[in-house]
Amino acid sequence: MPKQRLLIKGGRVVNDDQSVEADVYVEEGVVQEVGPNLNPKPPSGLTVLDATNKLVIPGGIDTHTHLQFPFMGTTTKDDFYTGTKAAVAGGTTMIIDFAIPQKGCSLIEAFDKWKGWADPKVCCDYALHVAVTWWSDKQSRVGSKNFSNMRLPRKPFWSVKEEMKSLVQDKGVNSFKMFMAYKDLYMLSDEELYAALSYCKELGTIAQVHAENGELISQNAKKLLAMGITGPEGHALSHSEDVEAEATHRAIAIANTVNCPLFVVHVMSKSSARMITNARNEGKVVYGEPIAAGLGTDGTNYWNEDWAHAAAHVMSPPLSSDPSTPDFLMNLLANDDLSVVGTDNCTFDTCQKALGKDDFTKIPNGLNGVEDRMSVVWEKGVYSGKMDENRFVAVTSTNAAKIFNLYPKKGRIAVGSDADIVIWDPEATRTISAKTHHQANNFNVFEGMVCHGVPVATISRGKVVYHDGVFNVTAGQGKYVSRPPFPPYVYERVKQREEVCQPIPVKREPYAGVVSATPSAP
Ligand code: URP
Ligand code: ZN
Ligand code: ZN
Ligand code: ZN
């Protein structure tokens, strides 16, 4: 077999810390050289891409997708094929999806199931976060909780705790998502959160939280339905900004108490973003992930008179009903109060959304983003003047790679890095539309948005998978990427704190005075 060789000529290589005019030479999926005027020999069998007047950036990493997700009585339209194909069309070369077990069910079984769905279909590299939707630390699950109505796990003698350890040691998982919402489905109590976050820290992993108060949502929804509010605006009203802010604050408090690094997924409101900003200012190890939809559109859509339009925007936490929120979140992202941009891509078409036509609590939660994330961040972040090209790379790939321990294999263009690369035209524009997008659903929340910043070519492990609108993808060509625990970017600080920030008892002479008599029981 001849070696797979690629030369990207004449572009400006942009990493998170610097930009240089340089060519990039790739062999067998790995970057071999970065420098001016490269001239690899022999010239035969070499694919050459011209990047003159273009940027050459690390492929995007979407930290938050739900492809082929069975949820709320249906399954998302985008599976691991259409979802990752759309991803590469938008300049994203790695996604991190979520394996989510039902309460009482095995985490390892969920991981294996999701991997079994993804492996034959993915068109780019991927990894899996795993959700902790219930808790047990006893060897036998039988009798540890009353799960009489739930299926028993395949390995009845393994606790959730033991499964987490095995996922880290044997399956390359270094992040777990805990839900504070979806009462009775995925929600954990504070006691369970405390246990799960404590163990996440011990394992050297990142604790992710869906920060919304599930009890308040449930009470609010009951009240609104009783008032006759059944449409999508009821979703926004029941998931008020307070609901997100309270849970964000609680998650930060719990994480800080057990010295566990925290990653707040889908940060949607100003209040929640402020909580994260404050925590970071206080030196806490907390990261916030806004999503493309939260930066590119807003929750006024829930009041649209067209039910299908309004329902298409339903997700949790909801898009903010304050139209100045997207700008606010982008400012925080630009100055490092927020860290990475995901999408929470979780697509349902209008017929699926219609499962909740008479009751907003039954509208499947989720919207698109995996294809458009890079362009939306360029338009709203870079074109607007809020961030430069280096910060763009930081928030679309590098920071994700550092936090989830993929760096510098991913998230950087350097010798030895995977050749996940995008040739990016900062001057070109495109108009986003469901009519032309590559996702499987019939609605796009960014419909009509004109974006500067267009991916001209996307390269996945050295293979040109998308070029000038033409795909060259094969289902299953992407690889599962293992992520070791203890990412240094996160854990150097955590480990040091563990050593030097322990409370020390005060040395004192034992009390020698009179002790009051214990009152006898009446
Ligand atoms: O609405 C959402 N976010 N759907 C996906 C599930 C989740 O909470 O991330
Ligand atoms: Zn969530
Ligand atoms: Zn999600
Ligand atoms: Zn497209």
Image (tube, rainbow, N blue to C red):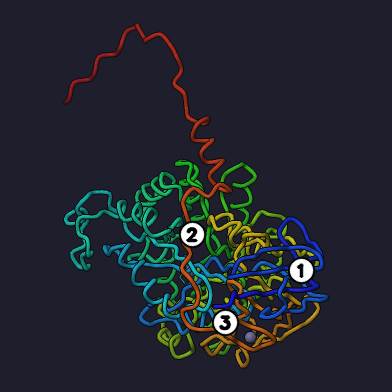
N-term mark: 3 or 1 = 1
Residue at the disc numbered 3: 86
Choose between 122 and 265: the one closer to the eye: 122
Dot 2: element: loop
The residue lying at 58 percent from left, 65 percent from top is: 268
Question: Which residue is labeled 2 in the image?
Answer: 211
Mark 2 is on which residue type? Ala
Quadrant of the frame with the N terminus? bottom right
Local secondary structure at mark 1: strand
Task: Farthest residue to the front: give it.
Answer: 42
Q: Does residue 346 lie above or below 257 as drawn?
A: below
Q: In this view, does 10 lie to the left or right of 347?
A: right
Q: Which corner quadrant of the image does residue 287 belong to? A: bottom right
Q: Which mark is residue 23?
A: 1
- Disc 3 vs disc 1: which is toward the camera? 1
First along the sequence among labels 2 and 1: 1
In this picture, is 498 found above or below 184?
above
Mark 3 lies on a secondary structure that is helix
Camera sees residue 478: yes
Q: Position of residue 87 (x, y in %)?
A: 58, 78
